[in-house]
Amino acid sequence: MVDPVSLIRTSPLDGLTLPGHYGLEGETGIQISEVRNLQLSAICSWPRNLSQLESEITRQTGLGKLPVPCQTLSNDVHTLMRVEPLKWWLLGPPVDVDSSLASVVDLSHAYCCLSLRGPSVTDLLSRHLALDLRDAERFVASTVMHHTGVTLQVETDDHYLYLPRGFSRSLYEILFESALQFGIEVR
Amino acid sequence: MTAKRIAGYGRVNPDELIEFSWDGQTLTGLSGDTLASALLANNQTVLSRSFKYHRPRGLMSAGVEESGAIVSTGSGDRLEANVRATTQELYSGLQASGQNAWPSVRFDLSEVSNLLARFFGAGFYYKTFMGPAHWLPAFARTARSAGAGTRAWMFCEKWIRRAAGMGAASALPDPDHYEQAHAFCDLLVVGAGPAGLNAAASAAEAGADVLLVEQDFELGGYLLSSGDKAHASELAVLLKRIEQAGVRVMRRTTAFGLYDHGVAGLFERVTDHQPVSASVDAHCIPRHRCWTVRCQHTVLATGAIERTMAFADNDRPGIMTAGAAQTYLNRFAVRCAQRVVVVCNNDSAYEVALQLAIAGAGVTLLDARAEIDEVWQQRLQSQGVEYQSAATVLRAVGHNRIRKVQVGLRDVASPQASWRPAETLECEALLVAGGWSPVLHLLSHRGIKPVWCETRACYVPGKHAQPITVLGAANAVFDHKQCTEGATQWATGWSASRAVSTAVPGRLLHGRRPRPQALLDALPNALPVAAKDNSSNNDADTEVDARMASGWQQDLYPLFEIVPSGEGTGGKSFVDPQHDVTVADVQLASREGFVSVEHMKRYTTLGMATDQGKMGNVLGIAVMAAASGRSISEVGTTTFRPPYTPVSLGALRGRSRGAHFRPTRRTPMHDWNLSHGATMMDAGLWQRPWFYAEPGESMLQTADRESATVRRSVGLCDVTSLGKIAVQGPDAAEFLNRVYTNNMASLVIGKARYGVMLRDDGLVLDDGTCWRLAEHDYFVTTTTAQAAAVMVWLEELSQVRWPQLQVHINSVTDQWAGVAVAGPRSRELLALLMDNPDQVNNENLPFMGVTRVETADGLPCRIARISFSGELAYEIYVESDYAPYLIDQLWRGAASMDGCLYGLEALNTLRVEKGHVTGAELDGRVTLQDAGLGVMAAQTKSYIGSTLAARAGLTDTNRPRLVGIMPIDAGDTFNAGSILCQQSDISGYGEGWVTGVASSPELGHWIGLGFVNGGHQAWENRALVAADPVRDRQVAVKVVSPHMVDAEGERLRG
């Protein structure tokens, strides 16, 4: 997880996300940026280990508990999201958990994360995701976009879309095309 | 027709003129017009030609049910056929034209087919073109075709299709954008008439999240066209309430289908009402949008469609429904004609007659009922409307426009409803009011059959227990006050129940409002009036005060087909004008034994295609009932299917076309590969390098060079697309041991093993490698083709079959990028990257060894010494973001060793030479033994597929087995897919088949892999023929061991 000193992480969107305003003139319905240098790991456990895992995770991250399905919990360093019944995604420095308690797998390079903000963000997402985002807050869902499995995280005003790396350029292109109608600011 | 704009009427803006073109003429309309109202105002009578007989057709309605004015709009790549003029909003520059006519709709030479109409009855195509066709000219017949089959149809089809049908679509690529979208709501209200608006406003005011959809560009429904000033005020209030309550409103949007679990399909016409603009194109604004809406409850306030009646030549231009004329007058300020006859069987036409008279038309009203209410008589007299009871129209006279009607009278004392001819009346328009049919199409989509109500002479909603409520005219409540009060009452009750339900403690949805479904589902699904109908079906008449429900002073007189007494009047009586289906067609179907209404529909085409029973359904069923001596209830009704109105294919496809037809998957080295000369190819969704040609090289020359270089020096291949799965947990070893055919429990940390998985049926699913990284941590690789299937399979096994095993499966295909480093100098190349070259020497990294090291630059890698090429080789994986750096470093070293980059073509050559299988061989029909992998089957354990792999059929030694194939003449080539046959019997399935071929620089000739019965030992010293019937080629070949290069495997262990 520690980046080699002499190396810079590349992005599948390199060359694609040039800052500027695109689409509908005079309107910025969507602000879009890539969250680079993602630190993401999946923590997977089993029913009999949950209470012990919760103690371990809260001890290492400072988060009060394990989030329930579709919920996210955050502090200054970590965000924990329950993406499947027995799987959590951890944003931030990884935790060290005994392999008999839970398996931890690094996914920092497996996903490309887009940050989406703006008044039209739920409209844009409605073009791609069959998710009810009314009142969604501290919400996470494993879902499908353009036939591809993706994950959406919703905080108060921020929406984060995790695209599988190999598909990310293709998904970004179709997302961008559909966002032009709202006016886009690429940051 | 002397239609005319009337000042002071309508919702159009007389100060905003709009120019448009019709059949090449420039005409002028007003802002707020539809194409139909503008054409009517310009006295355009013939707007189309009918489907089969090419009869002239004009406006028949003012809504989506239009069967006459079906036109084409736009031109070139934006030519749109079969547009209903009644739903097309007028905009500046709109181009519209008639269709299915030559040279024009006003004078169409194809109308000659009308003269032959007697031959074109129901079943014409079946009777004429199916079976023996002795009437065909000799040149069109063959000995084979003369007796039976469809040859006659195939011979004539092109002419028939040219002569019949509707508009022609553009053959050019569609330049517009389309989009799909999702929406959620508590309450979906379909239809923004009085009932829909009241329901939506009341529910939203009580706190529900309401989505209101309206196919029109204005909200209001009947309130827009009634001509009642009180209605206009009421509409203004309702619109204010809707806005203040936060109802989400979608105009120009049709709910085209209802589906399971509260799902509705909406079709939004986003830009059809405005000229094409560069801005729309530049911003990829969709022309149409297809919405999938999920709601808790659906209200259908879809209104009702006015019916016509079947009398002779009832399709002449100038004949329309009375409600349509009212709409054109009160909403679009167009009086349809100066001299008007109104023919009716119910009260709803009276107001129309009065309003037209007030607008200056001369009006005669013919009511089929025995008496006319005295109050109405006084009102009609006061406006100079002539009227006659027990009267109707027997025949319309005219061609390109109606000129007069023949009146029919009935003897009210006679039980027989036959009509004797009386006088003729001059007129320019005939308005027909034959009763109202509630729009129940969406209910029908849910499998809810409508029920016939005798007193209201229409279908009403049938019983159901779905979260759908039908309100207003759609529920056969035609009285305005009852419509609005009923809708409000229902919405208030629904909201109250909802409020109670939300107060019930229940499962908390995180960040969501609780929406208990069960309580909502328990609510009544219709208003009391219809509910009585729903619950009693055939007892509807006794349960309901039909007059009150209808809102009429007098009962409707059910009249569908007008049968003259004595001799017929001639002419065609249409029941479905869109498909040219007549009363005679339905009667013929009945005489020919079509008893089921569904069969009759298909035989006659009644109510099919875009009409979906809007105009023709009830008339056709009534005619069928009369012809077969049954009641309408006994005949039943057909099933209306989605879409309610046409949905563009573009909207269904959304943005998934062109470059976005499907998602593309790129490796982290994609750009690097391109910048180094790769020609890419699709490998499933992946883009993979096919070959890296040097200037002047062909693909085969390149593959030869690349594969030879790998065998001589070293080559690099991007293998990121291989599936990669992390299998982790205390029971991972046990899990994998059950999945693979060979023993994985004994795999030690730091080693990899080649493995094969079977399906339950004992056939091979996939092959790959399994690396043990730690006690509870495995890294599994799969083929590119089967990566997803294996992932799903492993998830199913862990979650469903063996949930007791503590194991987790995660795809890490995107996390790790891989490069195959193959060739005798591959170790030397890897060593260049390391601080300590010994990290990759034979002792530290032996064959099938795995190591996790850092390069000299600090790049963490996973390296396994495994080979697909048969050479000394490694697969090196790094985290994806570093892949361009890795390949760059490797390439610097390889280039200095006269190495190469190689693509899939060379990869194929190398594996064919070695006899290594891929998806071409592992095609789902192959056992371990067939693929030459019998040694992979552990004898001391059970594994998935082990039992069924022992079936007799799978252990037969004469099954096709993997073999190598070489041409007898070294200069020959043969194709993948060829069938391997004996020289004496080149037919059928032969003895086997060729799965893959390659030019082998190592052997100096063409080679292949394939399967042959009994394997290569059975065919030693015997030639076969590789027969390619598709390309008409036959090549003599010999069958050899599949291991054609380095059969002992010495190189890869070097």
Image (cartoon, coloured by chain):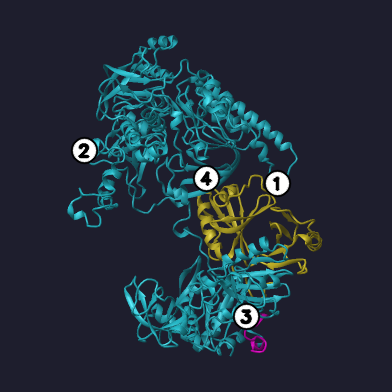
Chain colours: A yellow, B cyan
Q: Are marks 4 and 3 on the same chain?
A: yes
State which chain disc 4 sits on: B
- The secondary structure type at the circle numbered 4 is strand
State which chain disc 2 sits on: B
Q: What is the magenta range?
A: B837-854
| Mark sitting on residue B291 | 4
- The secondary structure type at the circle numbered 3 is strand
**Residue holding disc 2:** B112
Quadrant (top left/top right/bottom left/bottom right) for the N terminus of chain B: top left
Residue occupying image coordinates x 57% and y 47%:
A123
Give residue B697's quadrant in the image. bottom left
**Residue holding disc 3:** B864
Q: Are marks 1 and 2 in contact (CB under 8 Å)?
A: no
Label 3 CA crowd tier, 10 Å (few <14, some 14–19, many 20+): many
The amino acid at mark 4 is Trp
Kindly report the distance in space between the C-alpha atoms of the residues bearing marks 4 and 2.
44 Å
The amino acid at mark 3 is Ala
Kindly report the distance in space between the C-alpha atoms of the residues bearing marks 1 and 4.
25 Å
Magenta run includes residue B845: yes
The amino acid at mark 2 is Val
Kindly report the distance in space between the C-alpha atoms of the residues bearing marks 1 and 2.
68 Å
Mark 1 and mark 2 lie on one chain; the one further toward the N terminus is: 2
Quick check: can you spot residue B722?
Answer: no
Q: Are marks 3 and 1 on the same chain?
A: yes
Q: Are marks 4 and 3 in contact (CB under 8 Å)?
A: no
Mark 3 and mark 1 lie on one chain; the one further toward the N terminus is: 1
| Mark sitting on residue B509 | 1
Mark 1 and mark 4 lie on one chain; the one further toward the N terminus is: 4
Question: In the image, residue B691 lies at what x, y percent?
Answer: 45, 76
View extreme (front): residue: B952
- The secondary structure type at the circle numbered 2 is helix
Q: For this view, does A34 lie left or right of residue B567?
A: right
